[in-house]
């Protein structure tokens, strides 16, 4: 399969070209309910819903190094502190009003890193907004504007009721040309080709282009059933393969924002999974390749308490088929913290049901945060003891639950200049294993001639030497 996955960044909303239809006497149009009626017009549905889709303008201030930074002539005047250039970059996306009080859902990548965000309603009015909650793992963000009036909103439907072939409308602002509406069908479900920690997407052939990110994918009842997010394209434009985040995940994310949560917490189950291969499927007697193969179970975690074991395959959750590990993660996330779910598990050809209660990631050891100071490579780094809870907060795999992790860095600190990054796990220093923040602070107070540091970054071991 050739092509590129691209973020659909720039809003979408307009009018669809419909099939030719005979001329009828002018009568009031009703919202179409049947496919034959769709040949007449989508306009009643568009008029009913278009006002709930907005444009999102995100402005970022970008700092760039002066092009003369390495020129000896200019260094005579400025020394090593050459003035940096700053410029403003504006990106365009879409959003959907989901609560009449001005609550808007969009993609995280539309607003991430923005210094200023403005919302343009379909009637042309613009409002400043604030970010209530955002999360890069699920690529969702909740925004809020204050208009002191009730705004048109799009109700959230049940994306689990979708079937391949269902008619859908996509609304947004592709390429910034203005509000545009396109039509299509649900092409596939449970797609996981988009890079996202909850890899479970609705695929549609409704035209989605740059600027559509955060726009609405809507069913024929006028309900939001997906949030347009990405396209598969070689040209940068629509090739009839677009992806939307299911509405059921949007609903759970909005609930977290309404509760006032500062972060979006996903359930911790204490297990890792891999896709089922054809060899595993044959060995277990599966009629087709599907499910999530358990590769590791953490002691005393929810999975262990439910009796799950490595080598077993989860094939369904609450009676809904699980196609791959990403689908399992999606189902667990939309079930929500505190829920008790029923897992269908296959073990050596025998099928059984396992009940599991979904919990927050635990803090298995005190985090004991420390800001390292002094004359050492770690100076300016805030570190903590790693646990599933800390890993989840840092958007790291929760099975990475031991050692000392860099939480943040002071700007222009020794640690920042030497290339340390948040999420780095400090494994050893001068041959001594670092097991907690206390041991790191003690060794940081020493004065060796050479610092030999081993870290783990994104699953890779890196060895560095500093004087």
Image: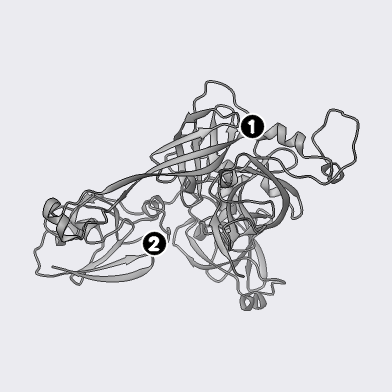
Helix, strand or loop at mark 2: loop
The quarter of the picture where the C terminus appears is: bottom left
The quarter of the picture where the N terminus appears is: bottom right
Q: Earlier in the sequence, mark 2 or mark 1?
A: 1
The dot on residue 400 is 2
In the displayed structure, does residue 461 sit left or right of residue 71?
Answer: right
Number of marks drawn: 2
Q: CA distance from mark 2 to mark 1?
A: 45 Å
Q: Residue at x 44, y 62 (%)?
A: 299
The dot on residue 334 is none
Q: Do the CB atoms of the residues marked 2 and 1 lie less than 8 Å apart?
A: no
Residue that lies at the very extreme toward the top in this rendered image: 148
| Quarter assignment of residue 290 | bottom right
Question: Where does residue 124 sit, x and y in percent of width and height?
Answer: 57, 29
In the displayed structure, does residue 156 sit left or right of residue 428?
Answer: right
Picture layout, residue 16 above or below residue 1: above
Q: Residue at x 21, y 58 (%)?
A: 417
| Quarter assignment of residue 292 | bottom right
Helix, strand or loop at mark 1: helix
Which is in the foreground here, disc 2 or disc 1? 1
Question: Where does residue 61 sit, x and y in percent of width and height?
Answer: 35, 43
Q: Nearer the viewer, residue 307 or 462?
A: 462
Report the colour scheme: one colour
Picture layout, residue 259 above or below residue 400: above
Question: Where does residue 102 sit, x and y in percent of width and height?
Answer: 54, 29
Q: Residue at x 51, y 29 (%)?
A: 126
Picture layout, residue 89 above or below residue 30: below
Q: Nearer the viewer, residue 203 or 324?
A: 203
Disc 1 target residue: 51
Q: Nearer the viewer, residue 347 or 460?
A: 460
In the displayed structure, does residue 305 sit left or right of residue 466?
Answer: right
Q: Is residue 259 visible?
A: no
């Amino acid at each position: 399969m050739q092509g590129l996955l691209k973020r659909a960044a720039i809003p979408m909303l307009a009018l669809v070209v419909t099939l030719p239809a005979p001329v009828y006497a002018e009568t009031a149009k009703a919202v179409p309910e049947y496919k034959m009626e769709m040949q007449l017009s989508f306009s009643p549905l568009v008029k009913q819903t278009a006002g709930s889709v907005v444009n999102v303008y995100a402005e970022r201030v970008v700092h760039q190094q002066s092009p003369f930074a390495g020129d000896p002539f200019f260094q005579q005047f400025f020394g090593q502190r050459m003035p940096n250039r700053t410029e403003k970059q504006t990106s365009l996306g879409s959003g959907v009003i989901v609560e009449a009080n001005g609550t808007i859902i969009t993609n995280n990548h539309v607003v991430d890193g923005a210094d200023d965000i403005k919302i343009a309603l379909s009637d042309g009015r613009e409002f400043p907004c604030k970010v209530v909650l955002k999360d890069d793992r699920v690529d969702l963000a909740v925004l809020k504007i204050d208009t002191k009036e009730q705004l048109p909103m799009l109700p959230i439907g049940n994306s689990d009721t979708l079937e391949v072939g269902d008619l859908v409308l996509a609304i947004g602002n592709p390429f910034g040309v203005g509000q545009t509406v396109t039509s299509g069908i649900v092409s596939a479900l449970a797609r996981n080709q988009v890079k996202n920690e909850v890899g479970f997407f609705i695929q549609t052939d409704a035209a989605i282009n740059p600027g559509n990110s955060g726009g609405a994918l809507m069913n024929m009842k006028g309900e939001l059933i997906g949030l347009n997010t990405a396209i598969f394209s070689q040209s940068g434009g629509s090739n009839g393969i677009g992806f939307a985040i299911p509405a059921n995940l949007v609903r759970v994310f909005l609930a977290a924002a309404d509760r006032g949560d500062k972060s979006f917490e996903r359930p911790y189950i204490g297990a890792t999974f891999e896709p089922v291969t054809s060899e595993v499927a044959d060995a277990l007697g599966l009629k087709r390749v599907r499910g999530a193969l358990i590769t590791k179970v953490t002691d005393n975690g929810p999975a262990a308490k439910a009796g799950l074991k490595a080598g077993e395959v989860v094939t369904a959750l609450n009676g809904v088929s699980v196609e791959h590990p990403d689908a399992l993660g999606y189902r667990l996330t939309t079930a929500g913290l505190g829920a008790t779910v029923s897992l269908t598990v296959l073990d050596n050809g025998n099928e059984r049901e396992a009940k599991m209660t979904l919990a927050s990631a635990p803090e298995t050891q005190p985090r004991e945060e420390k800001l390292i100071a002094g004359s050492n490579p770690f100076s300016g780094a805030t570190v903590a003891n790693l646990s599933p809870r800390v890993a989840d907060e840092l958007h790291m795999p929760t099975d990475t639950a031991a050692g000392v992790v860099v939480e943040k860095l002071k700007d222009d600190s020794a640690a920042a200049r030497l290339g340390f990054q948040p999420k780095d796990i400090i494994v050893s220093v001068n041959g001594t294993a670092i097991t907690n923040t206390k041991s790191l602070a003690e060794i940081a107070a020493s004065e060796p001639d050479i610092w030999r540091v081993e870290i783990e970054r994104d699953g890779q071991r890196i060895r560095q030497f500093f004087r």
